[in-house]
Image (cartoon, grey):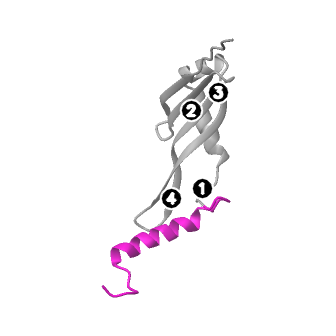
Amino acid sequence: MKTGLIPVKFRKIIFVLTAVSLYLPASSAGDYKPQKYKNTEQTITDIAESDTDVQNLISEGYIVTSVRPVIKTTIDAEGNVVTKATNAVLILQKDTTGHASVMIDIEEAKVTQIVILTKTVIEKP
C-alpha cells in the first residue's frame, strides 16, 4: 500500500463526514448537534397531547419537562444533506415521585410507547 493515497471506499466516508460537519454546527462541547426548531417541538407536543394516555398523565399532575427529537441526517443520491426529526422522546415529571418517557413516531404522528417510573420513599426513624 502506498502512503498518501486514500482507498476509494474511505474517500466516500471522509466526504460524507465532511459534508455532514458543514451542516451541523458544533456545540461548545465539541460534538455536533443540529439546530433546534420550534415548530418541530410544537408538533411533538401536539402529537403527545392528542393521546388519551398522555392526557391522563397530565390530568394526574405530570408536566412536560423536556422535548427531545431524534434527528436523522442522510445524504441522498444527488448529494443533498437531509436532516429531519423522525422520532422523539417527551419527558414528563410529577413532583419528585413520578417520571414518564413518551416515545413518539413523528412520521406516523402517534405515540408508540409510554414508560412510567414511580418512586416511593419510606422514611424510618
The range drawn in magenta is 1-30
Eyeballing the image, is 29 above or below 39? below
Front residue of this view, candidates 31 and 125:
125
Residue behind mark 4: 82
- Which mark is first along the chain, 1 or 2? 1
- Residue 95: where, in percent of width, then height? 69, 23
Amino acid type at mark 2: Ile
Specify which label sits upstream in the sequence, 3 or 2: 2
Residue at (59% x, 42% y) in the render: 68
Q: Is residue 11 magenta?
A: yes
Q: Give the quarter of the figure containing the N terminus.
A: bottom left
Q: Which residue is mark 3?
A: 93
Q: Residues within 10 Å of mark 3 (few under 14, many from 20)?
A: many
Q: Position of residue 110 (x, y in %)?
A: 49, 32
Residue type beneath disc 4: Val
Tell me the residue that label 2 is attached to.
47
Q: Mark 1 = which residue?
A: 34
User: Disc number at residue 90?
Assistant: none
Work out whether mark 1 precedes mark 3 in sequence or the reverse, and give the earlier one.
Answer: 1
